[in-house]
Amino acid sequence: MGVSGCGKSVVGAEIALNSGGVLIEGDAFHPPANIEKMSAGHPLNDEDRAGWLTLLGEAMATALSEGKRPILTCSALKLIYRERLREAVPGLGFVFLELTREVATDRCSHRPGHFMPASLVDSQFATLEPPYGEDKTLVVDATQSVADIGKQAAIWWMASQAK
């Protein structure tokens, strides 16, 4: 989880690889109206995200019911969004990919073919409620290598499941 440009997709893929999980790409679940809104440079609000979060929770619950280990990429910027996902999947953990506004803006500016423009990075930080101190949440520096973050997150999650 984290703001646009923090590396959710590439880190999620790495975590899935290191943990034997299946990647669920949150962006793929956005309805066309959300994509159009973001593409036009308008941030999503709670109402825009509500149905999307429901779909993500359902996708994770389905994966679990099929005996899979879901690894979801999702901004989950607010506590209420994370709580909604936790309702769908009790025991859900989060890896918060933390980085500065400047790094996020730079990364988004150089990301070809993505609907989320760099101009929305400020709105992401305005919405962000960092998950400091939340149960089953790992905070990592998103400027580390993808391999390092992926390994660290997989080890952390496996250890948390053993408790």
Image (spheres, rainbow, N blue to C red):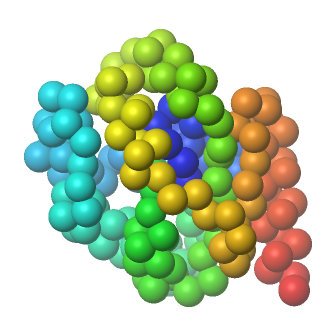
* Position of residue 117 measured from the top left corner of the image (x, y, whole percent): 32, 25
Name the image quarter holding residue 98.
Answer: top right
User: What is the x, y in percent for residue 113?
Assistant: 34, 20
Residue 119, quarter of picture: top left
* Residue 53 placement (x, y as % from top left): 33, 66
Question: Can residue 123 be seen by looking at this rendering?
Answer: yes
Residue at coordinates 75% horizontally, 40% vertically from top-left?
Answer: 141
Which residue is pictured at 44% across the width and 63% down the height?
78
> Horizontal placement of 131 versus 56: left or right?
right
The answer to whether 139 appears left or right of 23 in the picture is right
The image position of residue 73, as x and y in percent, is 51, 52
Q: Residue at x 54, y 40 (%)?
A: 9
Residue drawn at (59%, 71%), measured in percent from left and top? 68
Q: Is residue 13 visible?
A: no
* The C terminus - image quarter: bottom right
Seen in the picture, residue 110 relative to 130 is either above or below; the reply is above
**Residue furthest front in the image:** 126
Q: Is residue 124 above or below residue 117?
A: below
Q: Is residue 119 above or below residue 52?
A: above
Relative horizontal placement of residue 156, taking residue 5 as reference (left or right): right
Judge by depth and name the residue closer to the eye, 90 or 24: 90
Foreground residue among 29 and 97: 97
